[in-house]
Amino acid sequence: MAPRKKMDEVEDIFAPSSAKRVKIPKRTTSSARAEAPRPERHTIVLQSMTEDRARREERTTRPMQNHIALYRNIALGFFVVTLLLLGGIFFTSVRKATVDITYTPAKISFTDVVQLGKNRGQDGRTVAGSVEVKTVTLTKTYTPSGSEKLEIPITGIVRIKNESARSQPLVKTTRLLAADGKLYRLTKSVVVPAGGELKDVEVYADVAGPGQAIAAGTNFTIPGLWEPVQKKIYAIADAELKGGIDERGVVSQSDVQKAEADIRAALVSQAQGDVQNTEANAAYNISSVTLDGLQVERKAEPGKTVGPFAITARAKAVVVRYNGSQLADLVRARIATQPVEPYAKVDFDAAQMTVRVESYDTIRGEAQLSLLVPLVKMLRADAGALAPEQFAGKTREDIDALVKEFQGVENVRTDVTFFPYWISKVPSVGGTVEVQLHVVPETSKK
């Protein structure tokens, strides 16, 4: 029974404390002590029980560890998928394509005829205005563009001295002879007082040209006087006599044509100024003037040598004035009815419009006006054909071919840039597409 006692004691040792079992050790007899088990057997039992407990704990914790590893893998996979998704969204959103379209506006024009009356018409073809007749006269002086040099007699003044006892009259053209043979004549008759002198006597060379120049201090004899008297009555050049060349204008046919065109324009300006100064209706701030019965008078003839020449012109100026804002509105209404490409627009500048009077009635105050209206055709930035979605999914080559099909504008060029640089098509989904229009003036074309 001794082994059973030991097993009971061992079980009591490993029994849970909650059982609160209390064992009172029995007295060990000598025979029992003699039969006590060996220590090796007790150790083996303890090891066996410890291993059994470890196996039970392992069976309990291993499923938990497997669950933790599974959750860790799921979380890691979700994180990687999230990063990939966010990366894809970011890449899609930052993609950008910029389409730069450069072109030259096309210049076009159209003609039209409108009526002018005292009041604005309800038919959309009549503007308010006035018809007046003014008589204008103007004289202007013009200078020839060409010239030529002519030899002319030298002119100047001398001093005549009289050392005789009586006065000496000298008639016009009296000769004055220099020692070198150069001959001058008096411009007018004079009387030289006795025992005195006469200053500032006008003379001229008998021969034209600069070769007749006289140095200052030169004495002249008067060949027409009696020889003994010539020593007492003589002339002195106190200043140099020089010149002999005159540069005069030569009137050409071109000079005459330019002068007549200028005076016609001056007549128109004068007539406009007269009407503007007297017109009561300030709304008529644009005028057209037609010269009726123009007469031009001039004395200069082409090919003749003259100085400045004068031209006189006179005419009846028919001044037609029209309401500029009404006419511009009428033209804009006509432009709105003209066909134009859906991706283009037409700009109109009223200041560039040419108005010509075809006919007029001064009694009724009516006129017929012909118009030449210059227009500029440009691309519309808000056109559907230029919307960003039109370029989605296209390459540079596709865009270039698409834009060059636009009609009505000139020198169309495209420049497409992508971001990031390695993409080669305009984003179809996500990303940004920017379309920019650049106008190159006609003077900048190469």
Image (cartoon, helix red, strand yellow):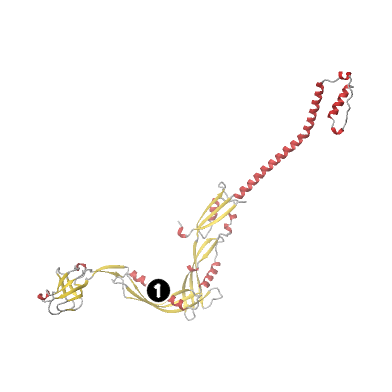
Residue drawn at x 34%, y 70% as measured from the top left: 255
Q: Is residue 62 left or right of residue 277?
A: right
Total numbered badges shown on the rendered structure? 1
Q: Is residue 352 left or right of residue 313?
A: right
Q: Nearer the viewer, residue 110 or 424?
A: 424
The residue at which mark 1 appears reads as 266
Quarter where residue 73 is shown = top right
Residue 71: percent from left, percent from top: 72, 40
Question: Is residue 138 depicted above or below 17 in this figure?
Answer: below
**Helix, strand or loop under label 1:** helix
Residue 396: percent from left, percent from top: 54, 51
Can residue 403 be spotted in the picture?
Answer: yes
Residue drawn at x 49%, y 64% as measured from the top left: 108
Residue 405: percent from left, percent from top: 53, 56
Q: Nearer the viewer, residue 228 or 17?
A: 17
Quarter where residue 296 is shown = bottom left
Can residue 169 be spotted in the picture?
Answer: no
Quarter where residue 230 is shown = bottom left
Q: Residue furthest bottom?
A: 363
Question: Is residue 265 depicted above or below 413 in this figure?
Answer: below
Q: Type of residue at label 1? A: Ala
Q: Pointer 1: residues within 10 angstroms few (<14), some, or many (20+)?
A: some
Q: Quadrant of the N terminus?
A: top right
Residue drawn at x 81%, y 25% as measured from the top left: 45
Q: Residue furthest left?
A: 228
Q: Quadrant of the C terminus?
A: bottom left
Q: Nearer the viewer, residue 235 or 341?
A: 235
Q: Is residue 310 left or right of residue 377?
A: left
Residue 304: percent from left, percent from top: 29, 71
